Amino acid sequence: MATIEKSLLKGIEVGKDNVLVSHLQYADDTIFFGEWSRSNALNLRNLLKCFELSSGLKVNFNKSSLYGIGVEMSEVNLIARYLGCQVGNLPFIYLGIPIGTKLSKLKDWNSVIEKFKSRLSG
């Protein structure tokens, strides 16, 4: 993504190989990941406005949530108001997978595995 290469958005590094992740997309859902900063939030908002203008589609900020990990709630609230979205709470479920919970052990995945098994057995 050119915005990452030009340091307009700063993603996060994950895993032992420090893979840079800035977003994940599935159908019409997008999750943005990034370093917490007001400039990152401003650039994200500008990027989404450019998307709207170039595509003719509309981003529904009212259905969007902002999550801050290791960030003061007052800061999360401030940026959420600026973006026009709601403040989300961890953990939450995305595509059937719990986000914001510890999933380091196999037993932590049991609920996800059982959900997949029940859908596959039908």
Image (spheres, rainbow, N blue to C red):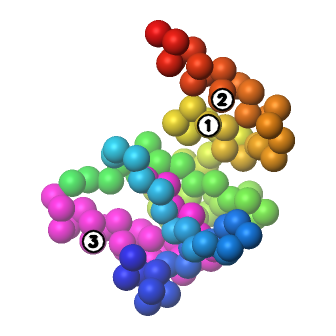
Say if residue 90 shows up in the picture: no
Whether residue 2 is in magenta: the answer is: no
Whether residue 44 is in magenta: the answer is: yes
Residue 115 image-quadrant placement: top right
The amino acid beneath tag 1 is Ile
What label does residue 112 carry, if any? Answer: 2
Q: What residue appears at the point 47 percent right and 57 percent down from the top-left corner?
A: 24
Pick whichever of labels 2 and 3 is earlier in the sequence. 3
Separation of marks 2 and 3 at Cα, in angstroms: 36 Å
Q: What residue appears at the point 68 percent right and 59 percent down from the top-left corner?
A: 68
Residue 6 coordinates in the image, percent (x, y): 43, 89
Where's the N terminus, which quadrant? bottom left
Pick whichever of labels 2 and 1 is earlier in the sequence. 1
What label does residue 50 carry, if any? Answer: 3
Q: Check the image and report above or below for 89 versus 38.
A: above
Q: Which of 104/90 is in front?
A: 104
The amino acid beneath tag 2 is Val
What residue did someone put label 1 on?
97
Query: Over which residues does the magenta segment extend?
Result: 30-56
Label 1 neighbour load within 10 Å: few <14, some 14-19, many 20+: some
